Image (cartoon, helix red, strand yellow):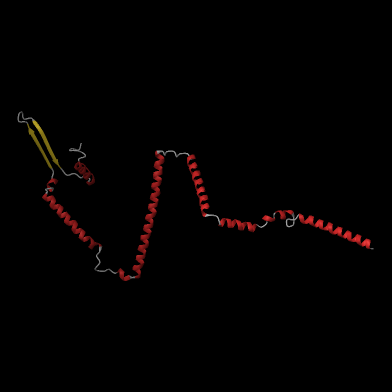
Amino acid sequence: MNTWSTYDATLADDDDVHAMAHMSAFLATTPDFGLGSSLDTPSSNPSSDDDSATQAKKHARPKHEIEVLHAKHMELQRQLQLLQLLRAPPRPLTPWQARAMRQAEAAQRTLQENSRLKRLVNEQRKVLAALERSLRKCPRLLSRDPTIHTEDDDTTPFKRLLQRQYDKMESEWIQRRLYDGTTPLRHTTLERSTEDGAIASFHFVAKMIAPLDYTSMAHVFWTHKTGLLGPSCS
């Protein structure tokens, strides 16, 4: 009886051993209980790695960061110079291209000036509209004050000054005998030689009134005064 019981116990132990072996082999294939987990144990805590990296960044010196940025800046400058050297030189513009460019720039400036003037006009319109609203709210401002001069009253002093200037001009014309120059005149003078009576010189003066453009005549007169044409019109 004891022999069979011992044999049964031995079989039970063998079965337990085989079961444990199978269980260990099965668990070895899983990532939680296998060899990979035991090998990765030193680095299995990513949070600790992140904390150490963060602490390393925190403890990084600003001087090192400045040096890195300076080196990157120098590298970018070198690349820019290289690209500028590799770029083809611009071709000279033809006269028509230069003229078209100038016209485009002038058109752009004109559009900008037009926009600026439109803004000014709109602002003035807003001011006028505000004044009109103020006048409508206060009708007493629309009543004419007798102490306020009208446009005719404002122009009266200027009219007097202009009339005084005309009178002074007329007196100057009379004093300088300029009115005598308005009458037509023809005068001829002959000078003869005392030896044989031949004509030595001939002088002719003609004076008449002719309608001339004031601007053109002023230009001719100023040209003569400055001596650009010399003593004659030729």
Q: Quadrant of residue 167?
A: bottom left
User: In the shown orientation, is residue 233 left or right of residue 120?
Assistant: left
Please identify the residue farthest to the right as the structure is shown: 1
Extreme top residue here?
196
- Between 102 and 68, the residue placed more toward the observer is 68
Establish if 134 lies above or below 106.
below
Residue name at image x 63 percent, y 58 percent: 48
Q: Quadrant of the N terminus?
A: bottom right
Residue 3 vs residue 95: left or right? right
Residue 160: image quadrant is: bottom left
Q: Position of residue 44 (x, y in %)?
A: 68, 56
Point out residue 145 in the picture as x, y percentages from the top left corner: 26, 69
Q: Nearer the viewer, residue 15 or 231?
A: 15
* Residue 219 x, y percent position in the rendering: 22, 44
- Residue 223 position (above or below residue 119): above
Residue 137 in the figure: left or right of residue 213: right
Coordinates of residue 21 in the picture (x, y in percent): 81, 56
